[in-house]
Image: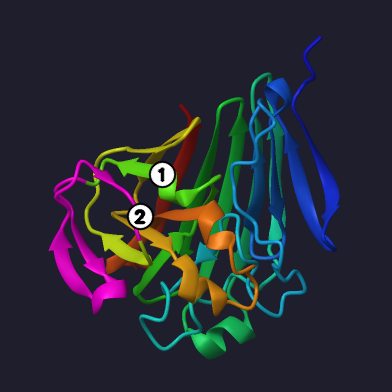
Amino acid sequence: MPTKPSIETIDFNGLEALRLNGPNGCSAVISKLGGQVLSWVTPDGRERLFLSDWAVFDGSVAIRGGIPVCFPQFSDLGDLPKHGILRTREWTIGEQRCGDDFALVTMHISDDEDTRDLWPFPFRAEITLMLEADRIDVEFCVENTGGETFAFTGALHSYLRLVQVEDAALEGLYGCDYRDAANDNEVTRESGTELRLEGETDRVYRTVKRPLSLQAGNHSLTIQNQGFPDVVVWNPWIERCAQLADMPPDDWRNMLCVEAAAVEEAISVIPGEEWYGRQTLVVA
């Protein structure tokens, strides 16, 4: 008899986390540290998210892998710490809910004295993770709780696990302009029907409106973004990976970041308003 979806508190490498147990044996894990999704296992038993074997879980640096939340700054495009101020902070568990075919949790975090020392705006951020048999939905919500408009960049920095990135083909970016950080930020238009990686890749694709399809051997995934206008595609490749202290030198081969992002134009939120963005990963 099928097991009813459930949610349980677990210890994950010393972190307090929630495991969502969904239909047909699927599962997902989200940590209070960073509000970060760390695992997604589909009914076939396959782990779909990359998590570095050398990842650090003590909060001193961001966890390398899963789906980190970047806010209110993407990468080093500003004066804040790289990728913002939420990745090494504790979030608070909110709603937990299960149905016959899904499990759902929310976590939230608000400004405090430490965040305002870095970024002087009151805010409330919430991450929602919903697990179904063939998919996860990750939704990020930002509320402006202060008295003046603020603007931010950010991303759901999804690390997807692959057997061999050289075999991967990402479709859906044809005709989109992209800024190539691995090539002196040159702006180019994507002319191929599929993107295949042949070296270090660090691209921000602008105004992506179509779903993406990732094919790699018998691995097939559909990626749908809502609210986020851009898509970031990143792989450090050999030399850059060797410089990362929290990633084994050969692990560039086993991952590809395909991120729902707002990079090229900051998103403005007026006082009292909210903004939502979502990424849905579906086993095709």
Q: Of the numbered discs in the image, which one, if any, rests on residue 254?
A: none
Q: Is residue 186 magenta-colored?
A: yes
Residue 124 seen in the current view: yes
Residue 17: x %, y % from top left = 77, 53
Q: Residue 281: percent from the left, percent from the top?
A: 48, 38
Q: Is residue 166 magenta?
A: no
Instruction: Indicate the amino acid at tag 2.
Output: Leu
The type of residue carrying mark 1 is: Ala
Mark 2: give few (<14), some (14-19) or many (20+) Cα within 10 Å.
some
Residue at 48% in and 69% down: 238
Q: Residue at point 71% right, 40% down? A: 96
Q: Are marks 2 and 1 in contact (CB under 8 Å)?
A: yes
Front residue (pair 128, 156): 156
Question: Which segment is the magenta one?
Answer: 174-198
Name the one closer to the observer, 117 or 66.
66
State the image coordinates of residue 222 (x, y, percent, origin top left).
41, 34
The residue drawn where x is 70% and y is 21% is 24
In the depicted structure, whether residue 133 falls above or below residue 205: above
Q: Which residue is mark 1?
A: 168
Against 201, residue 231 (above or below) is: above
- The residue pinned by badge 2 equals 197
Q: Quadrant of residue 177?
A: bottom left
Colour style of the rendered protein structure: rainbow
Question: SS of the residue at dot 1?
Answer: strand
93 up-or-down from 268: above or below? above
